[in-house]
Image (cartoon, rainbow, N blue to C red):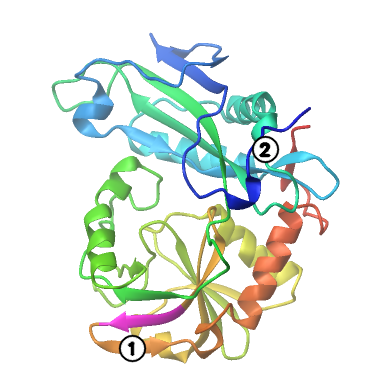
Amino acid sequence: MEKKNIDWSNLGFGYIETEKRFVSNYKNGAWDEGALVSDSMITMSECAGVLQYAQTVFEGMKAYTTEDGRIVTFRPDLNAARMEDSCKRLQMPVFPQDKFIEAVSQVVEANAAYVPPYGSGATLYLRPYMFGSSPVIGVKPAEEYQFRIFATPVGPYFKGGVKPLTIKVSDFDRAAPNGTGHIKAGLNYAMSLHAIVTAHEEGYDENMYLDPKTRTKVEETGGANFLFITKDNKVVTPKSSSILPSITRRSLMQVAKDYLGLEVEEREVYVDELENFAECGLCGTAAVISPVGKVVNHGKEICFPSGMNDMGPVTKKLYDTLTGIQMGRIEAPEGWIHVIK
């Protein structure tokens, strides 16, 4: 199979239309079989539920070319399970998990020419998503839905190498205590846009959101979980019912424990204790780990000495080990790698 004529090493992190995407429709209480289609455009009612009341959820994942030439995805079962949780919370029909994984495989295989070669630093990004498609004028769930997956080749999240981030403690709240912060709903990201634009205008890379009830505990950013390293090399991640359960973060915690022999802990992390940590990072699908050099809490600067110029040593080991697993250089735990071809 011949690859597309793309300058893989200079790809940015943006959308490039590929040839096939998967589409399945929910109508009269059931999902149809779904199919791969060529048309990238969506036509729906002007009164569709997604347009009126933001009834939409999504996932983000990647396909890779491994060192031995296989095309694989990373833990798609967890994406399928998380989308099920998201659907249930927004009163949407669940797309079956086995069919989710099958659809992912179909999209990747159909767009195999767009999967970047091993060593290029690029990957094929996959976006499964679902939305209410039938007309809804009263505040209630839609009756019809569409599930889709598209693929786009993307370059490394950090062009020209990793540069530690400067983050501000935000005055905005990301999620309510009993709200939707734990699911991957489009509405969560819409409400974070003003906060991130404001942070960028003030010279910061990202926001650190605190718990909205007491505003004393670290939650996450608009699109990534936090991960901290103590001075004695313990890996700590914040615990909260309104944090999105990042697949990357959960994988990194297992890598820390089982591959690196580090102590790991998921607990409440107070903003007042940030200065006691040696390293800080953001973890998510796009960049795996983004090192944080500085957090600014209303004028007070908290610096992480190990990460001011590059990744800290423990963060780097975590990054190298997880990406090594994803790319086939390191043996993966059972079930983590889903081989497509």
Label 1 secondary element? strand
Q: Which mark is residue 23?
A: none
Q: What residue sits right under mark 2 in the picture? A: 115
**What's the amino acid at mark 2?**
Val
Q: What residue sits right under mark 1 in the picture? A: 301
**Image: 294 above or below 317:** below
**Image: 270 above or below 42:** below
Magenta stretch? 293-297
Circle 1 Cα neighbour tier, 10 Å, few/some/many (<14 / 14–19 / ≥20): some
In the image, taking residue 146 as reference, residue 161 lies left or right, namely right
In the image, taking residue 336 as reference, residue 228 lies left or right, namely left
Q: Nearer the viewer, mark 1 or mark 2?
A: 2
Residue 107 at x, y = what percent?
A: 61, 27
Name the residue furthest right: 68
Report the residue at 49% width, 17% height from top. 24
Report the residue at 58% width, 57% height from top. 248
**Would residue 212 be seen by someone viewing this image from the given angle?**
no
**Would residue 245 be seen by someone viewing this image from the given angle?**
yes
In the image, taking residue 271 as reference, residue 2 lies left or right, namely right
Report the residue at 50% width, 84% height from top. 308
Residue 259 at x, y = what percent?
A: 76, 69
Circle 2 Cα neighbour tier, 10 Å, few/some/many (<14 / 14–19 / ≥20): many
Residue 227 at x, y = what percent?
A: 51, 71
